[in-house]
Amino acid sequence: MGVIERVSGPLVVADGMLGSKMYDVTTVGRAGLIGEIIQLRGERAIIQVYEDTTGIRPGEKVESTGSPLSVDLGPGLFGMIYDGIQRPLEVLRGKSGAFIGRGISADALPRNKMWKFVATAKQGSRVRAGDTIGYVQETELLKHHIMVPNGVSGTLTRISSGNFTITDRIGEINTGKDRIAVTMMQKRAVREAAPFARKFKSDEPMVTGMRVVDTLFPIAKGGTAAIPGPFGSGKTVTQHSIAKFADVDIVVYVGCGERGNEMTDVLTEFPELKDPRTGRPLMERTVLIANTSNMPVAAREASIYTGVTIAEYFRDMGYSVALLADSTSRWAEAMREISARLEEMPGEEGYPAYLPKRLAEYYERAGKIETMSNRVGSVTMIGAVSPPGGDISEPVSQGTLRVVKTFWALDAPLAASRHFPAINWLKSYSLYTTAMSGWYEKNVGAEYVANKKAALELLQKEAELKDIVQLVGEDALPDSERIVLIIGAMLREDFLRQSAFDDVDAYSSLRKQSHMLAVMMHYAGTARELVGKGVSADRIAAMKVRAEIARLKGVPDAQVEQTAKKLMDEINSESSALLVTEREGQEAA
């Protein structure tokens, strides 16, 4: 037990803390505020406090719990809304009203709720860390596997099925040195990455239903992505769409330092969302962590780690998990403030010199892995970045881009023109495309891979021509280049642009994307052939089939293949008619 020596905002310096360890959780002052030791200097401990330190005075007591900041993991996580240190917000509201009172704590998981536990392991069997010994059917679709805690292995001397609370003993493991009681709840330190057997190469896409992402800049399951963009460009909306439509088993959403009104929208909308795949409430496979900008700054730093630890827990069950963080810029700003109060040497723009290291350590916890018990699971990390003024040359954006492999550059002008998703196809990239080409060829088709490449080349060529058009005008271009502008506009407006308010267009399966792209590339190839045979770009642009191609995005998934074949036939028919007309005109001349 120590004594407060100095208070500086969220930082408290306590003397007499001999025997304390780095990252131990402490209770600070008479109010019993929750803190974490982040620096030790002899008997002095520097503590970051996760609550408002107003009124805390030198001379008050500080006590270390002897344990690192940890989260409770077990049945009851789905549908919960936590703050940055895993306190359930609904419970806290019942205790202190609309604003969280100081020194208030609550169990992260309900201790009195009974769960039906079904044992799958046999008494007397050898078990090791991560092995499943039973499960709880927490929702209709997801089993909550009860696993042997990390660091424990031995002989399962007792196990029972039945109705239990998460703290009841359901079994016992003899490690050879002692006997360890097994419950349905386990604790994990948030700053320690969970162990795994090996990490696989990310070669399977996480389908989001957004055509600009899935077709042009895909992310792999177990991959990492950054979404930088200025205010109002759609970072939060893009992440909401991914949370709703991505083909993952579980979603962990971390609102880190966001404005209160944005988090209010999340907290009110998510519980009402229906899972499009099952028709069940989306919250049945979602965990929300809400840490608004008016909450203590130190809790922002913890919220990111709380989220990734929960994601790793579900990954170890063999599930694919999407971890969405909005935004890591607020996390970095919290580190900057704490670093300044520690009087550390500032780096670029005042951020601590270890910012790139912390970013790398965080994103390194993503991946598709083989668990210690030979299951395969994945954590896919998508972090929003909020660079001031949209300038991605600032340290957080640059530090993030060094470690992530997918970059979705949001564009304010696109957002202002109601183009959703507002991802700029000229600035974005994905380093997973080559690694996943084999998966696409096997599961979607080789034609899709070729069409993806051709579409991106067309969009890049269109951008170059638009610069020339601004100087000389479109009429000065030859028909071979004017047709590129026509096809580029089709790709932008009819393929990349989606309507979040249209039940059909809000989500596009890979199958639908493949057929849409095939039709547009068939039109592009036909248009080039027609131009080569003397047909003018104006007459090609006036083809009636163009309007039907534009409406293809509104065709239901079950009908898209048939509709696509019909459109290709119409393209062939109209192009043949144009050639006949062109030939007759030349003969008449």
Image (cartoon, rainbow, N blue to C red):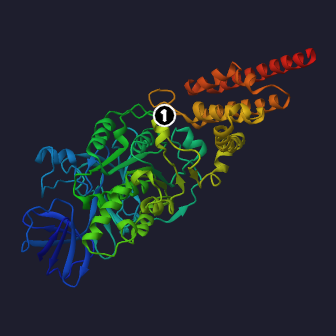
Amino acid type for the residue under numbered disc 1 = Ser
Q: Secondary structure at mark 1?
A: loop
Residue positioned most to the front: 472
The C terminus lies in which quarter of the figure?
top right
User: In the image, residue 68 lies at what x, y percent?
Assistant: 26, 69
The N terminus lies in which quarter of the figure?
bottom left
Q: Is residue 270 left or right of residue 369?
A: left
Q: Is residue 544 above or below residue 407?
A: above
Crowding around mark 1 (Cα neighbors within 10 Å: few <14, some 14 to 19, many 20+) is few
Q: Quadrant of residue 459?
A: top right
Q: Is residue 231 above or below residue 499?
A: below
Q: Can residue 356 be seen in the rendering of this structure? A: yes
Q: Is residue 255 above or below residue 362?
A: above
Q: Quadrant of residue 174?
A: bottom left
Q: Can residue 187 be seen in the rendering of this structure? A: no
Q: Nearer the viewer, residue 374 or 577?
A: 577
Q: Nearer the viewer, residue 354 or 208?
A: 354
User: In the image, residue 14 lies at what x, y percent?
Assistant: 15, 76
Residue drawn at x 23%, y 46% is 114
Q: Is residue 101 left or right of residue 303?
A: left
State the residue position of label 1.
Answer: 417
User: In the image, residue 429 lies at what x, y percent?
Assistant: 58, 51
Residue drawn at x 44%, y 60% is 394
Q: Nearer the viewer, residue 362 or 151?
A: 362
Residue positioned most to the bottom: 42
